[in-house]
Image (cartoon, rainbow, N blue to C red):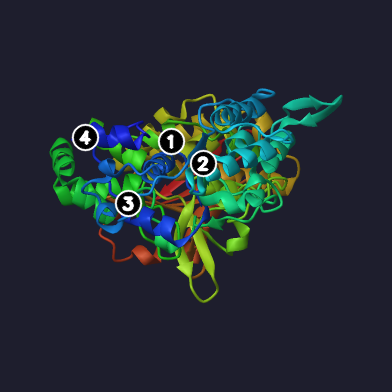
Amino acid sequence: MKYPIGIQSFPQLIEDGYVYVDKTDLIYSLVKEGKIYFLSRPRRFGKSLLVSTLKCYFEGRKDLFKGLAIDKLETDWAEYPVFHLDFNGDNFTQTGILEKKIEGRIAAWELEYGKGTTTETLGDRFAYVLSQAHKRHGRRCVVLIDEYDKPILDVLDTSYKIRIDGEERLLEDWNREVLKAFYSVFKAADDDLQFVLLTGVTKFSQVSVFSGFNQPNDISMDGRYEALCGITQEELERYFAEPIEAFAKRYRTTPEGMREKLKSQYDGYHFSDRLTDVYNPFSLLNAFSKLQLRDFWFSSGTPSYLIRLLNHTEENLNELTGRYYGPEQFIDYKADVEKPLPMIYQSGYLTIKDYDWEYNRFLLDFPNNEVKNGFVSLVASDYLKPREDMSGWVIDVVKSLKGCDLEQLRRLFTSFLSGIPYTMRGKKGEAETERFFHYTFYLIFRLVSVYTVYTEKEQSQGRSDCIVETDSYVYIFEFKRDGSADDALAQIEAKGYARPYEGDPRKLYKIGVNFSSKTGTVEEWKVRG
């Protein structure tokens, strides 16, 4: 089986015999039921392949769709003039790159369809091209724009400047204005348009780049199209039964056991209140190709703009995850407001995990282990700036928990926390210092994802700081700052944190830990079996 890793061309995928998960029934519904669409999906989720497939469809290339679902649905196969603009691959942190990109495409189209004598702006020139193409072909035009938001994401929350008419301005603001003026063409050229699709990672608010033209139909959370990109559980089992069996032999498990491993590592995305499970296609195809469970998607790119946002927001990751939100809190992103939640969600680092029908609220959390491990590691490294390598440290912690080596675990915590620079833990004020310690332990235990880990787990008499469940042991941690380990153990007893495990056959340990805000590391560590 040939896996189309890095291949975004539909013709190449079909002609060279790569595996293709058939989405053409959804594409047929899309083109027949509407006109101007916007679709937000995380990077490497198949948006470019979707655009390429639509391009071939509107060019009437029926031969490429033989045997696919749309082959039985479409009877016309008309050919439309198609205009495709892809913002992938360009570095928009450099002055003038965005204008050159758009100018180059329009100039190429003008060579084919002519240039108006009174048109001046990029939008006006494109509108003229669309009208001429409509006249020449006798059919309205199709416009496909891939990664429409990359020129903004590249410079989001940076200090890059540009000088316009002697005035210095933020490049972020300038790129937004250029795009807004260009996209306004879709309002002026409405009579010349048959179909428009814009794809991207984020949906910026309607007061920014979309305000200059008729609002697109945002299908990002439309249940009918939630599986338009990505791979569902049914598709996984239908298309990939053979590699799953090979994978199972490699990992010495059953096909059912392998499906569970794949699910926990790469599944878990939901794009509507229907909660249809969607796998990350980039990671899944890489895993099948290499027969390895690795963090393929996360390691393929660093979300630097998210780290920039998190660095100066008042919210920490533990205050954002595992909570219910109204749609207005995370769907529309207003680019000039420092709220990271919508960007984290739309970029794929959080996803919908549950839906409250009565109150129209969505539970947001990490989609799967790959994303949780990668993103928490990145945030922890940036937030704590430890001298010790985090990946090796986490493996040592996992081994200590597995083998119940609690003295080694104490040494690991002590050395790691000692390696955090004083400038990171030396927060101003009691509340800030307390918040730093709580966030530090949240990040540390979120990294230990091999086992079931609960941080601040709600129980009948309060919230335990952390509970770790392994195959053979249950560890209940209570942390104190500038207190005593005995006080921590007393709280575990008084609040009954161990009560839910009274009938559990696993060995249970209660661990009271006291940290010193002066030294920044473990001062007391006591264990009670």
Q: Which residue is mark 1?
A: 298
Q: Earlier in the sequence, mark 3 or mark 1?
A: 3
Distance CA(mark 3)–CA(mark 1): 28 Å
| Residue drawn at x 30%, y 32% as measured from the top left | 12
Q: Quadrant of residue 225?
A: bottom left
Distance CA(mark 4)–CA(mark 1): 27 Å
| Residue drawn at x 27%, y 41% as measured from the top left | 64
Choose mark 2 or mark 1, whichever is in front. Answer: 2
The N terminus sits in image quarter: top left
Q: Badge 3, how many Cα within 10 Å: few under 14, some, many 20+? A: many
Q: Which residue is mark 3?
A: 24
Q: Position of residue 267 (x, y in %)?
A: 34, 50
Q: In the image shown, does 232 or 395 lie closer to the viewer?
A: 232
Q: Badge 2, how many Cα within 10 Å: few under 14, some, many 20+? A: few
Residue type at tag 1: Phe
Residue sitting farthest toward the right:
166
In screen coordinates, is 289 left or right of 447? left
